[in-house]
């Protein structure tokens, strides 16, 4: 069965991103496929490459990137939610005249059309966070 996941919760204030990551690993271990993970609302912070947690904590952008590399999963960040929360790729940083970008290279900024495509293509959509 093919799944897509939607992550809504800020990884620094909710457990939704970590729960989604663990759920994704369980799905893949169980032989399922994941087409796309769409990060929306506070979940866009999962793609912030400047995140620097304490040494004994997992660094979510790298954890998601490793999952993508192993299983060719599409990691999409809602562009409007990302920009609003300061998660920018190089192109958006230049367009908004910011001094730097911070989108982890494993992720891409895109629109809600990517979420619509995921709902049309996937057998199941699972949402994490409110």
Image (spheres, rainbow, N blue to C red):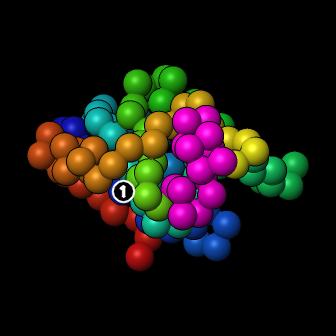
> Which part of the image, by quadrant, shows the N terminus?
top left
The count of marks equals: 1
Q: Is residue 52 visible?
A: yes
Residue 112: image x %, image y %? 29, 53
How far across and down, in percent of the image, does residue 51 sit? 74, 51
Can you name the residue that lies furthest to the right here?
A: 55
Which residues are drawn in magenta?
A: 82-97
Q: Image quarter for residue 2? A: top left
The structure residue drawn at horizontal position 41% and vertical position 53%, both measured from the top left corner, is 78
Q: Quadrant of the C terminus?
A: bottom left
In the image, taking residue 5 as reference, residue 109 lies left or right, namely right
**Residue in view at x 38 percent, y 34 percent:** 74
Residue nearest the viewer, comparing 46 with 33: 46
In screen coordinates, is 130 left or right of 94? left
In this picture, residue 76 sits left or right of residue 15 = left
- The image position of residue 47, as x and y in percent, is 58, 47
SS class of the residue under badge 1? strand
Which picture quadrant has residue 91? top right
Residue at 19% across / 50% down in the picture? 116
Quickly name the residue at label 1.
Answer: 6
Residue 42 percent location from the top left of the image: 53, 66
């Amino acid at each position: 069965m093919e799944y897509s996941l939607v992550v809504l919760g800020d990884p620094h204030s909710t457990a939704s991103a970590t729960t989604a990551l663990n759920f994704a690993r369980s799905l893949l271990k169980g032989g399922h496929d994941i087409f796309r993970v769409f990060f929306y609302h506070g979940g866009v912070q999962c793609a912030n490459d400047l995140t620097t947690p304490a040494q004994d904590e997992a660094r979510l952008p790298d954890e998601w990137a490793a999952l993508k590399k192993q299983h060719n999963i599409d990691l999409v960040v809602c562009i409007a939610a990302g920009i609003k929360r300061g998660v920018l790729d190089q192109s958006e940083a230049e367009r908004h005249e910011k001094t730097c970008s911070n989108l982890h290279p494993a992720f891409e900024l895109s629109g809600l059309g990517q979420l619509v495509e995921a709902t049309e293509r996937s057998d199941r959509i699972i949402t994490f966070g409110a």
